[in-house]
Amino acid sequence: MKHKLSADGFLYRLRPVKLTDARFIIDTRLEDSERNKYIHKISDDEDAQRAWLNEYFDRDGDYYFVIENRLTGSAEGLIGFYDEKDGCAEWGRWVIKKNSFAAVESINLLYGIAFEQLGLSELYCRTLRANEEVVSFHSSIGEKTRSILEGHFELNGERYDAVEQYADRDTYYKDIKPLLDRRSMMIFKRAFKQTVGDLEFHHIGVATKDIDKEYACFSLLGYAKEGEPFEDENQGVRGQFIVAKGQPRLELLSNLDGCGTLDGFIESGNKMYHFGYMTSKIEKAYEAFLNCKCRVLSPMKESVYFGKRICFLVMQNRYIIELIEK
């Protein structure tokens, strides 16, 4: 059905399937011949797939999603739930591309949409009994086995037994979600390092009307100047880094004469207004943050102080980060 349900996780997001996804659906479902023996066959006919999608758009209680990688923006799989009735629905159409790590978090996001956004009370799935690896996976995350459905599936003219496994809201929030959250975070950390590299914290930017007066206050906390003061006409600011043992480096900043770069932060009282991070892969980091729905505040430009490129982005929580090229 046509819907607007979506969810963002650590590494992955679910968004509604669109008509333009027809080719992706075909390619993903036909990618692995070994895996395909456990799912219904489809043709390579893109027009037929679009016709199926148009029929799907007219059905009620049917929610089909593309699984996207938030860092790269690429689609890596499909998942959905359907046959919604009396607060319950069957989930399936679950196909992940080779070498993708989307399995764990895609399930977690799907449960979240079903229970939190739609208020369902149970999701269940039916897997070919012969597909022992997937049946075992469902058990490993805490889903319960309800029954064996004899001859439930027909594939290529033959009947196969199915294993019905399920989770209700209590089971999900008590047992399944904590496990999937932990696994999803571990996967995200590995993927983030591979895609972006290490982000090395460098400083907190402090907006001030008068750097000298601000420094006098921080000196009471043990801060001392690091390096010489600088002026950056590209950014419209002057600045001074200060450091103290066991405390974060601070970048004290004030407007250059005739510039209003920091006016909004000073007037709002948001003095500590950005975190600065060093990265050896600034272009990949920049792209990854944009894919994660960050907004560009100041595009890539050369920094007078660092002699390398920097940029500023606003995250969805309205916090500002500065990326600094190593």
Image (cartoon, helix red, strand yellow):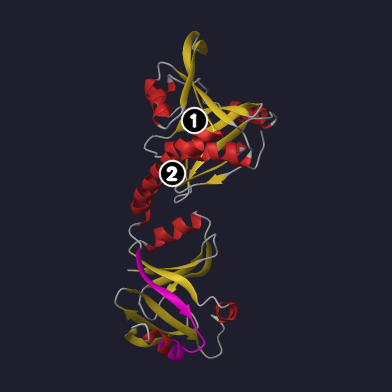
Q: Residue 173 versus residue 65: which sits nearer the camera?
A: 173
Residue 288 point in image, percent of width and height: 44, 56
Q: Amino acid at mark 1?
A: Trp
Residue 168 relative to residue 119: left or right:
left
For residue 78, say whether it is visible.
Answer: no
The quarter holding residue 238 reads bottom left
Which label belongs to residue 181? 2
Question: Is label 2 in a helix, a strand or a loop?
Answer: helix
Label 1 neighbourhood size at 10 Å, few (<14), some (14-19), many (20+)? Answer: some
Residue 168 point in image, percent of width and height: 54, 31
Q: Quadrant of the N terminus?
A: top right
Q: Quadrant of the C terminus?
A: bottom left
The label nearer to you, 1 versus 2, is 2
Label 2 neighbourhood size at 10 Å, few (<14), some (14-19), many (20+)? Answer: some
Q: Residue 132 versus residue 51: which sits nearer the camera?
A: 132
Residue at 52%, 60% (x, y): give it. Answer: 294
Q: Amino acid at mark 2?
A: Asp
Which label belongs to residue 94? 1
Q: Residue 70 versus residue 23: which sits nearer the camera?
A: 70
Residue at 43%, 44% (x, y): give it. Answer: 181
Q: Give me the C-alpha separation between circle 1 and circle 2.
A: 19 Å
Mark 1 / mark 2, whichever is N-terminal = 1
Q: Residue 155 versus residue 44: which sits nearer the camera?
A: 155
Residue at 40%, 16% (x, y): give it. Answer: 130
Which region of the structure is painted magenta?
200-215
For residue 221, say whether it is visible.
Answer: yes
210 drawn magenta: yes
Residue 278 point in image, percent of width and height: 35, 67
209 drawn magenta: yes
